[in-house]
Amino acid sequence: MSDVARLAGVSQQTVSRVVRGATNVDPDIRRRVQHAIEQLRYRRNPAAAALASNRTMTIGVVSFELSVLGPTVALYGISEEARQHGYATRLVTLASLERKDIRAAFESINSDTVDGVIVLAPLLDAISVLDDLDIGVPVVTFQQGSQPSPNSVSVNEVKGARMVVRHLLDLGHKTVWHVQGPPGWMATSARVQGWAAELGAAGRVIPTPLATSDWSAAEGYRVGCELAARQDVTAIFAANDPFALGVIKALDEAGRDVPGDVSVVGFDDVKEAPYFRPALTTVRLDFEAIGHIAVGRVLSMIKEEAEGDIPLLEPRLILRDTTAPPRS
């Protein structure tokens, strides 16, 4: 660290503040220090930093269902942001959402000692259990469809669902059918809420949503077969992109063209979405940004820096080739 300070023309204390991600550093000085760090290929010693700061320099991450897109991509953002600030991450996965399993996960993390915890379990049961736990360190949660708060990161999923419905109604469809997510997920509730609200505001019929048991393409195909048999269905909003993939397969097998006969819109914008056939119109959510923001807020809480509510991240409608006006 002394070599970095000498090259940058600053004190070792200033270098330490830059490495820790402190906000009270002049931008020009920060750039000089970062340039010196790159030139000298300086690498922070986590053990020494932990001893000097009386911190573990570790952030715990509790996650459920890493097979689901959102938590997986958010985890990447967490790891990257934590590393930039000299922190390691300690991942614990939840086998179930039973209270004993959630409590055991936090006890496992606490036994290793962490400075803060990020929870990637956007399910209604998980949030209610967390409210009853005394964790003892700062906690930030990833919640889907929740309102802004100081200790949760969320995307405006209600708005995203409304954008989908508005797009399809503007194309001339009389109503929009919805393949909803499995029960218990915050995303399921938020996307149903936005879909129904936009149809209701437009004075349109709100069909009964199609229920699913998980987020898989197989479930999308199963309910897609039901929808494909109905000639009055001209527009479908699938609660995620794998659902949309399954729905499109079911429609194709039934001889119904997408988007000529039926328009289909997904949600999440998985990296394969442009390569669906046809390329999928969907809603993009920046899950990686959620990870970065969550780490930033945990670090602020560790430093006891007061901050307000975390603004909701905005969704973006990505128009591709699976929507069109209904046949006259």
Image (cartoon, grey):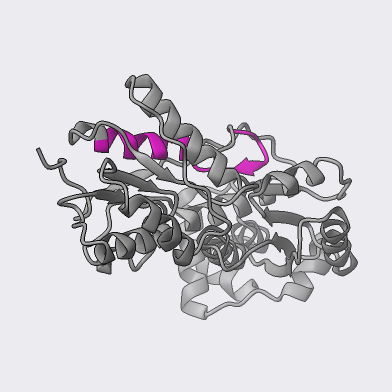
**Which sits in the foreground, 328 or 90?**
328
User: Toward which corner of the image does residue 31 lie, by quadrant?
Assistant: bottom left
**Which sits in the foreground, 170 or 146?**
170
Q: Is residue 213 above or below residue 194?
A: below
**Which sits in the foreground, 268 or 296?**
268
Q: Is residue 215 magenta?
A: no
* Whether residue 140 is visible: yes
User: Toward which corner of the image does residue 295 lie, by quadrant?
Assistant: bottom right
User: Where residue 303 sits: x, y (%)?
Assistant: 73, 47
Query: Extreme bottom residue here?
Result: 41
Q: In the image, 262: left or right of 17?
A: left
Q: Is residue 160 magenta?
A: yes
- Give the position of the N terminus as an image quadrant: bottom right
- Give the position of the C terminus as an image quadrant: top left
Q: Residue at x 65, y 74 (%)?
A: 44
Q: What's the magenta region?
A: 148-168
User: Toward which corner of the image does residue 204 lie, by quadrant?
Assistant: top left
**Which sits in the foreground, 256 or 128?**
256
User: Where residue 194 sits: x, y (%)?
Assistant: 45, 33
User: Where residue 246 sits: x, y (%)?
Assistant: 38, 63
Q: Is residue 302 above or below residue 232?
A: below
Query: Extreme left residue here?
Result: 328
Q: Residue at x 33, y 36 (%)?
A: 165
- Total numbered circles: 0
User: Where residue 327 sits: x, y (%)?
Assistant: 12, 42
* Whether residue 144 is visible: no
Q: In the image, 120: left or right of 134?
A: left
Q: Residue at x 27, y 40 (%)?
A: 232
